[in-house]
Image (spheres, grey):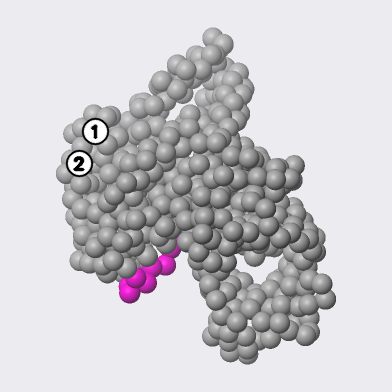
């Protein structure tokens, strides 16, 4: 059977499942054990194609399911089978596998599911509470999830119910499927910061479809790193959470002509709040990694360096905890539900610009970004710290927009230009770190020897500022003169 699954997934604590069930509308309840074996080729052809294949057993029946896609709507092909091994001819499976490739078990998922079906706001919804684990080789990872699947009716009902249930228990929207959890576990990435690996856009996509693909990838990056941050606060999760928020803010700016209507300003403000909630942690992490760590092996080690390092490490941990608090807050949960609802079901999708072709729109969006950048490019040499900070922001917007749309033009074709943007962003980032390091040090409570060491290290860095300014000017000139890869 071929169909499209419409589903929202949430992570939560095991102690909160009862509260979720109690807050849900009444309906028909069922409990069952689900045992699933996920399959792939030896070279992970299905994973690379964005698909998953499982054989699930429950109450003596076996069902084979192939899923692919992302976001609220996913393609699903399902059929009953008799044996333990999947049928290689199911649905689009043959087109996803290399000629002659074989399927083998990749990992297992076993959950206890409590399930309820009910009517809610003119929709039929299935609520599933899953508790269990995913197993791959010698590795295991617990699962505790709430799933809301739309059987019929408007998708907006799913988000309305999600808001209601989230008021009863802390529910964190999750974009990782059980298949993705298993793939990460097998790859040894089950509890690590997640990067945004780019999105592949179709030249035949509409502007709305392209924006949704970019936004989904950024939201998934935010959600995954927020989960890591809540479980094990640290610098990588802080950094990648900020990157995800900034990528989404950049997409809101780049696609603004198609996003007219209520909701855009709220989304922007919420994402700015999330970024700022991580700023102090990120600034301390950069100081610790870029200044303190190299100083320990340098030719001259300030006497108060150990005391300074101890003070900074203590403050980093407090800042990580503060960022984790933000990623645990009711505001964050509401941000993720409301932003996802707006991306997937917002009225902006019905606008004339949103329905247009992505190709011409992408040309215009990139041209707007490069014009804004070129207006400030001279500030790399002649401007002050504030002017260079603004140039850095423009370079970052240009980079994120170019990376989001690069697949439309061929990543190899866009590579040289993107290399120039990243080079400039790196040196402008170093200059921005210099501009913020003195206020950062002033905000710390340091013993005299630690304060002396900090002053000595900052003084050495400031002495190198003219060289950084010259590098930034050259990088800006090269980029301004590089032929764009679009238009």
Q: Is residue 439 magenta?
A: no
77 and 143: which is toward the camera: 77
Which secondary structure, mark 1? helix
Q: Are marks 1 and 2 in contact (CB under 8 Å)?
A: yes
Depicted 72 relative to depicted 270: above or below: below
The quadrant of the image that shows the C terminus is bottom left
389 and 476: which is toward the camera: 389
Per the image, the residue denoted by label 1 is: 387
Q: Is residue 196 magenta?
A: yes
Q: Quadrant of residue 16?
A: top right
Asked if residue 470 lies left or right of residue 270, the reply is left
Question: Residue 160 location, x and y as percent?
Answer: 51, 50
**Residue found 20% across the figure and 47% down from its top:** 372
Question: Residue 108 location, x and y as percent?
Answer: 75, 66
Q: Which residues are magenta?
A: 195-205
Per the image, the residue denoted by label 2 is: 376
**Residue found 37% across the figure and 40% down from its top:** 266
**Residue found 70% across the figure and 45% down from its top:** 22
């Amino acid at each position: 059977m071929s169909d499209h699954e419409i589903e929202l997934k949430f992570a939560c604590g095991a102690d909160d499942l009862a509260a979720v069930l109690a807050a849900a509308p009444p309906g028909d309840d069922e409990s069952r054990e689900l045992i699933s074996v996920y399959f792939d080729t030896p070279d992970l052809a299905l994973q690379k194609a964005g698909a998953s294949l499982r054989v699930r057993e429950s109450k003596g029946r076996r069902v084979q399911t192939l899923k692919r896609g992302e976001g609220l709507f996913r393609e699903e092909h399902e059929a009953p089978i008799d044996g333990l091994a999947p049928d290689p001819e199911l649905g689009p499976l043959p087109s996803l596998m290399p000629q002659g490739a074989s399927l083998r078990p990749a990992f297992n998922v076993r959950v206890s599911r409590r399930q309820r079906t009910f009517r809610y706001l003119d929709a039929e919804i299935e609520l599933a509470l899953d508790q269990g684990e995913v197993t791959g080789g010698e590795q295991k990872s617990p699962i505790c999830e709430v799933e809301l699947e739309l059987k019929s009716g408007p998708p907006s009902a799913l988000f309305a119910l999600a808001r209601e249930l989230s008021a009863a228990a802390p529910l964190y929207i999750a974009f990782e499927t059980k298949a993705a959890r298993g793939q990460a576990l097998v790859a040894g990435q089950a509890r690590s910061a997640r990067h945004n690996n780019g999105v592949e856009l179709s030249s035949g996509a509409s502007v709305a479809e392209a924006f949704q693909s970019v936004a989904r990838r950024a939201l998934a990056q935010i959600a995954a790193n927020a989960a890591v941050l809540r479980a094990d606060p640290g610098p990588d999760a802080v950094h990648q959470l900020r990157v995800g928020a900034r990528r989404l803010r950049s997409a809101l700016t780049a696609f603004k002509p198609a996003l007219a209507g209520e909701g855009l300003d709220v989304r922007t403000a919420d994402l700015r709040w999330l970024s700022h909630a991580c700023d102090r942690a990120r600034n301390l992490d950069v100081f610790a990694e870029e200044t303190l760590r190299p100083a320990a092996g340098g030719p001259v080690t300030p006497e108060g360096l150990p005391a300074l390092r101890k003070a900074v490490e203590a403050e980093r941990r407090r800042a990580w905890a503060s960022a984790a608090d933000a990623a645990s807050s009711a505001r964050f949960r509401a941000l993720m539900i409301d932003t996802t609802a707006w991306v997937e079901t917002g009225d902006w999708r019905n606008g004339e610009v949103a329905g247009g072709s992505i190709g011409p729109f992408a040309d215009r969006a990139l041209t707007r970004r490069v014009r804004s950048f070129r207006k400030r490019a001279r500030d790399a040499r002649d401007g002050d710290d504030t002017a260079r900070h603004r140039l850095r922001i423009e370079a970052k917007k240009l980079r994120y927009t170019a990376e989001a749309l690069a697949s439309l033009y061929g990543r190899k074709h866009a590579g040289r230009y993107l290399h120039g943007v990243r080079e400039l962003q790196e040196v402008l980032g170093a200059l921005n770190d210099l501009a913020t390091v003195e206020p950062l040090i002033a905000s710390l409570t340091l013993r005299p020897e630690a304060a002396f060491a900090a002053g000595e290290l900052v003084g050495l860095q400031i002495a190198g500022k003219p060289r950084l300014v010259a590098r930034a000017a050259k990088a800006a000139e090269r980029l301004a003169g590089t032929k764009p890869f679009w238009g």
